Amino acid sequence: MDDSLLARGVMALEWEANYRKRFSGDETVSKCFIAVPDAVDEDIYQVFDQINRPGCSVLDIGTGMGEHAVFLAQKGYDVTGIDISASAITMARKCATEHKVNVHFTVDNILSSNLKSQYDAIVDRGCYELIAIENLEIYLENMMKLLKPGGWYVLKIARRRRRVEAIKNTSGLTIVKLKDTEYKTLDNRTIRARLIVAEKASV
């Protein structure tokens, strides 16, 4: 078996275990989550308020419990949320039902995605920075395939220079906003972060 495929399978199992611990109340798992997994980040939804294109399609990569996907659906966006954890997707679907919104949630790995559609915008809060360095190119290549020409990529990431530089160096993607911000963690710490908004070339 290809080593990279094996590594992706292991990652999926690890995150499934993390979410199951989270749902069982196991506090030891808090260190695995960069940010609170069931809260909406104000700076992310401010970006979509500025984009202000209800009805356009949005892909939420690493949707987790679906908090951002559900919020965007409430704002009138046509949202798809993906995560490698089946347990997270189950909880996300419950969240959408409770809030009476329609979100297409599916188990999927951005490193070997089965998605065929393209989206007007892609949002990622917490997935990209957990991707192994050697897989960043695969992530970015797949993300760009899923983003429509002229589409927006909205990323929140802890300050990691190499990962930010990889975004800057992605051909066909132009950063239009780079803002210092922060994450709130499960154990009430504050982590410095950056909000990146980038646009894919129209042609």
Image: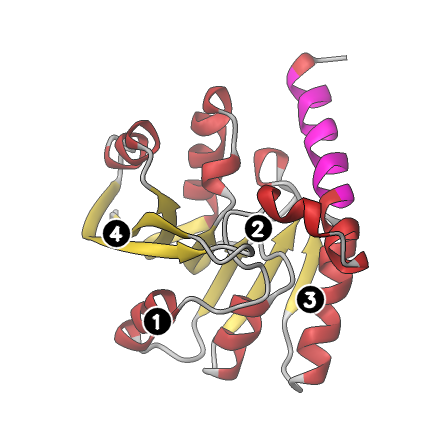
How many C-alpha atoms fall within 10 Å of the one at disc 4: few (<14), some, or many (≥20)? few
Judging by the rendered image, the residue that carries numbered circle 3 is 92
Query: Does residue 12 show up magenta in the picture?
Result: yes
> What residue sits right under mark 4 in the picture?
202
Q: Which residue, given by chain and number where applicable, does mark 1 sit on?
A: 48
State which tag comes first along the sequence, 1 or 3.
1
- The residue wearing badge 2 is 62
First reached walking from the N terminus: tag 4 or tag 3: 3
Q: Nearer the viewer, residue 189 or 119?
A: 189
Mark 1 and mark 4: Cα distance apart in space = 19 Å
Q: CA distance from mark 4 to mark 3?
A: 32 Å
Q: Residue at the spot x=34%, y=71% of the render?
A: 48
Decide if residue 84 is in sight here. no
Q: Write the residue at 72% across / 54% down.
A: 22
- Sequence-wise, which precedes: disc 4 or disc 2? 2
Q: Earlier in the sequence, mark 2 or mark 3?
A: 2
Q: Which residues lie in the magenta part?
A: 4-17
In the picture, the quarter occupied by the N terminus is top right
Of labels 1 and 4, earlier in sequence is: 1
Left or right side of 180 for 156: right
Give 182 or 142, whichever is nearer the viewer.
182
Return the x and y of residue 183 as percentages of the image width and height.
40, 55
Q: Residues within 10 Å of mark 1 (few under 14, many from 20)?
A: some
Q: Is residue 91 above or below residue 147?
A: below
- The answer to if 9 sits in the magenta stretch is yes
Q: Which amino acid, by three-letter code, is at mark 2?
A: Gly
Asked if one can make out residue 71 in the rendered structure from this viewpoint, the answer is yes
Q: Is residue 49 above or below residue 150?
A: below
Residues under numbered marks 4 and 3 in contact, where contact means CB atoms less than 8 Å apart: no
Residue 174 in the image, given as x and y percentages of width and height: 21, 45
In the image, residue 25 lies at what x, y percent? 76, 58
For marks 2 and 3, give the CA distance: 11 Å
